[in-house]
Amino acid sequence: MRARLTAAILIAAGLWFLMFSPLTSGLAGFWTEMTFSAIALTLMAVSFGRASGVGMPAMRRPLLQAVVGVAIAFALWGVFVAGDWLSQMMFGFARGQVDMVYSLRTGMPEWAIAVLLLLVIGPAEEFFWRGYVQATFAKLLSGRRHSADLAFVFTTLIYASVHICSMNFMLVMAALVAGCVWGFVYRMRPALLPALMIRHALWDALVFVLLPIG
């Protein structure tokens, strides 16, 4: 279980390097790389998760899951709007780094990007990071005190760390804040994983295409 988890995290880090590092930018096209990465994350979460005894919980009360997912997505979008305003007051480089992230909206129509974020990329990331990585950490640490808390902390830090290769402070901080929110909800209610997948997908589409920040 530990070896599979380590391999999955290293593969994810490699994929993030391919997508976000200035050294590899433009090799295959960002959205092609992002879609390939989402498929790879899903396959690892399914196969490694099944072998480790973790995975997607049964979908209970789907309407409630959808409502919770939408509510969290819009609430987090509001947090990021406020954070963008505050960061621009504190850091002179903030707006430029945010604009660098939005510069990735090229090479594909915005409606197609939104569809990919909603149906492929957002759900895949949540399924992998919370449904597999955080769940597996909790299982590995189950003999220790506060195992679920430690799993939340480890997963959040790793999720933020794989964005460091972008050399973009604002992107790393965005990943840290979002990872804290998503990971905390999963830590408190793992059964809400479907809602978190909805929320992650909708939040991606909101912040990147539908209601850009700034």
Image (cartoon, rainbow, N blue to C red):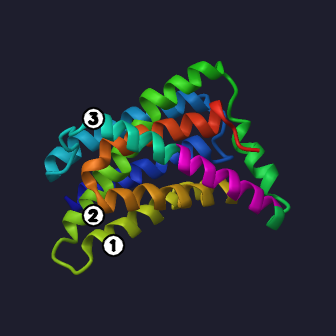
Q: How crowded is mark 2: few (under 14 residues within 10 Å), some or many (20 or more)?
A: many
Instruction: Locate residue 61: give its quadrant.
Output: top left
- Please provide percent x and percent y for residue 139: 19, 64
Q: What residue is shown at x 54% (from left), y 44% (from top)?
A: 74
Q: Residues within 10 Å of mark 1 (few under 14, many from 20)?
A: some
Note whether residue 59 is visible: yes
Name the dominant secondary structure of the magenta segment: helix
Identify the residue at the far bottom of this view. 145
- Please provide percent x and percent y for residue 206: 59, 36
Q: What residue type is labelled 2?
A: Phe
Q: Is residue 86 left or right of residue 9?
A: right
Q: What residue is shown at x 78% (from left), y 57% (from top)?
A: 94
Report, in whole angstroms, how far the alpha carbon at label 2 lies from the one at label 1: 8 Å
Residue 105 shown in magenta: no
Q: Which of marks 1 and 3 is in front?
A: 3
On the image, numbered disc 2 is attached to which residue? Answer: 137
Q: What residue type is labelled 1?
A: Leu
N-term mark: 2 or 1: 2
**Where does the magenta region start and end?**
74-88
- Please provide percent x and percent y for residue 20: 61, 45
Report, in whole angstroms, how far the alpha carbon at label 1 lies from the one at label 3: 29 Å
Helix, strand or loop for disc 3 = helix
Q: In this view, does 60 lie to the left or right of 149?
A: left
> Observer-nearest residue: 76 or 54?
76
On the image, numbered disc 3 is attached to which residue? Answer: 62
N-term mark: 1 or 3: 3
Residue 84 shown in magenta: yes
Q: Quadrant of the C terminus?
A: top right
Relative vertical location of residue 33 with respect to residue 125 in this rendering, above or below: above
